[in-house]
Image (tube, grey):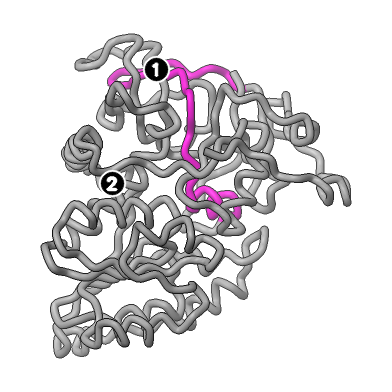
Amino acid sequence: MRAVLLGGFGGLNKLRVAKRVMPEARDGELQLRVKACGLNFIDLMVRQGNIDNPPKTPLVPGFECSGIVEALGDGVKGFEIGDRVMAFVNYNAWAEVVCTPVEFVYKIPDDMSFSEAAAFPMNFVTAYMMLFEVANLREGMSVLVHSAGGGVGQAVAQLCSTIPSVTVFGTASSFKHEAIKDSVTHLFDRNADYVQEVKRISPEGVDIVLDCLCGENTGKGLSLLKPLGTYILYGSSNMVTGETKSFFSFAKSWWQVEKVNPIKLYEENKVIAGFSLLNLLFKQNRGGLIKGIMDKLITLYNEKKIKPVVDSLWALEEVKEAMQRIHDRGNIGKLILDVEKAPTPLMANDSTETSEAGEEEEDHEGDNENKERMPFIQ
């Protein structure tokens, strides 16, 4: 079978499509024929080795996918061969066939496409749990979300719209504003002084801050919280600047984070929290909790209240170009690797690898200078 292989941590040249041995479902697992895979910013950080305790390479990246059940491991109940499903996977999602425990697999609504299903789990579960499980979003509250044009940002905006009179402040690159202006109440340029803009509209600040940037935005977010407000950190994309891991960017981001004083939180009645869906699933064994959240989200989807925003579809062989797009913060919504999509001839030449060992050649200088990214845009 084909799979995207990360041969080592570093730049885009570490990614190749490789032939791998097809996995078989063990006890309690499902084997899925993959149709589409989600690409998230955490995948970019994994590629760079920019995470705590990175796994050993070579490895197949990816944490979510959609497809069809091909085989059932012993003890599996509630699924049949041929079921259309979406799933969380602890790595190995970017492949034609994956196996994952049954507790991480969910049936797809009849009118949901495979690309939408691959865009659904990470973004909407993250957004839902931060808003409702951690911050207790209620009628009349206000939310500030960074990267409002991304997959999580758009999921946050849609979920906020299900609660009456919620005000959503969003930051995003200016070129995204026209496309997402109707999804949030107030939209600011990501490089502008959004603190002053928010205070001009809401002098008391906001009830919830959702921060995927970290660095100096931590202090800014805390300063914007109303009494009893909640700041949630769920990413650190400011640490990613160049193509490879930058110790300077890491140190700068760490240095800019405001040192939290618990006494000050007590005096100001503010809450600071963190959220990592992958740790909750794979390290803290909260699969049952996530299953309940997915049931609620699927109900909202069936009621036409939420819908995944798919930015573009890419072939497995176009993974480098897809990852560059998310690195450039050029996406509106989710990037999807479409396993059945044929690559454009322009992109296919240097992306195919047949060695299972993941051995790879460095790109020749200048090979990619004139390459134009040509995804299928939804």
Question: Which structural element holds mark 1?
Answer: strand
Q: Residue furthest left?
A: 139
366 inside magenta stretch:
no
Task: Please give the residue where the numbered disc 2 appears in the rendered image.
Answer: 125
Marks 2/1: CA distance?
Answer: 21 Å
Earlier sequence position, callout 2 versus callout 1: 1
Q: Relative to 312, is 137 on the left or the right?
A: left
Amino acid, disc 2: Val
Tell me where residue 353 appears, x and y as whole percent: 73, 29
Residue 153 in the image: above or below residue 188:
above
Read off the magenta span. 20-49
Left or right side of 345 for 143: left
State the mark number for residue 139: none
- What secondary structure is found at the residue carrying circle 2? helix
Q: On the rendered structure, is 171 left or right of 162?
A: right
Q: Residue at left 19%, top 81%?
A: 226
Q: Is residue 287 visible?
A: no
Q: Are marks 2 and 1 in contact (CB under 8 Å)?
A: no
Q: Which residue is mark 1?
A: 68
Along the line of sight, the residue nearer the viewer: 60 or 146: 146
Question: Is 252 in front, or is 374?
Answer: 374
Label 1 sits on what residue type? Ile
Residue 256 x %, y %? 47, 82
Kindly identify the residue that appears in the image at 30 percent across and 81 percent down: 222
At 29% from the left and 52% from the top, the residue drawn is: 158
The N terminus - image quarter: top right
Q: Residue at x 52, y 66 (%)?
A: 173
